[in-house]
Image (tube, grey):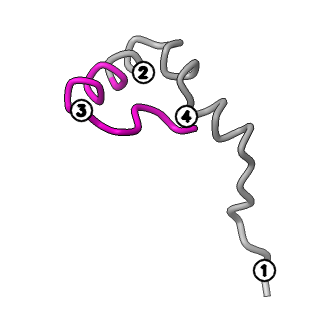
């Protein structure tokens, strides 16, 4: 049986989807802005 492909790593998850990753690009900043405007409890991944 093949091994599971999703081996979660908190550090990588934060690096790819975290706040600073969002701030890095214009699209990411747009995501943060949209989530703030919508009133999301979690604006980015912890």
The answer to whether 28 appears left or right of 10 in the picture is left
- Tell me the element at label 1: loop
Residue 4 in picture, x, y percent from top left: 73, 72
Along the viewing direction, whichever of 11 and 27 lies nearer the viewer? 11
Disc number placed over residue 17 in the picture, else none: 4
Tell me if label 2 and label 4 are in contact, CB under 8 Å.
no
Q: Which residue is mark 1?
A: 2
Residue 14 in picture, x, y percent from top left: 64, 34
- Highlighted magenta segment, given as a residue range: 31-46
Along the polypeptide, which appears first: circle 3 or circle 1? Answer: 1
> How far apart in space, not on screen, are marks 3 and 1 (Cα)?
41 Å
Along the polypeptide, which appears first: circle 2 or circle 4? Answer: 4
Q: Which residue is mark 3?
A: 39
Quadrant in which the C terminus appears: top right
The answer to whether 1 appears left or right of 20 in the picture is right
Disc number placed over residue 28 in the picture, else none: 2
Q: Is residue 36 magenta?
A: yes
Residue 32 in picture, x, y percent from top left: 36, 23
> How far apart in space, not on screen, are marks 3 and 2 (Cα)?
17 Å
Along the polypeptide, which appears first: circle 4 or circle 3? Answer: 4
Measuring 71% from the left and 44% from the top, which residue is drawn there? Answer: 10
Extreme residue toward the front, this view: 41
- Tell me the element at label 2: helix
> How far apart in space, not on screen, are marks 4 and 3 (Cα)?
19 Å
Marks 3, 2: nearer the viewer = 3
Residue 6 in picture, x, y percent from top left: 68, 62
Extreme residue toward the bottom, this view: 1
Along the polypeptide, which appears first: circle 2 or circle 1? Answer: 1
The answer to whether 30 appears left or right of 1 in the picture is left
Marks 4, 3: nearer the viewer = 3
Tell me if label 1 and label 4 are in contact, CB under 8 Å.
no
Measuring 47% from the left and 33% from the top, which residue is drawn there? Answer: 44
């Amino acid at each position: 049986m093949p091994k599971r492909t999703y081996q979660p790593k908190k550090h990588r998850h934060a690096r790819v989807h975290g706040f600073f990753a969002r701030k890095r690009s214009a699209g990411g900043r747009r995501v943060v802005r949209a989530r703030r405007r919508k009133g999301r409890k979690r604006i980015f991944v912890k």
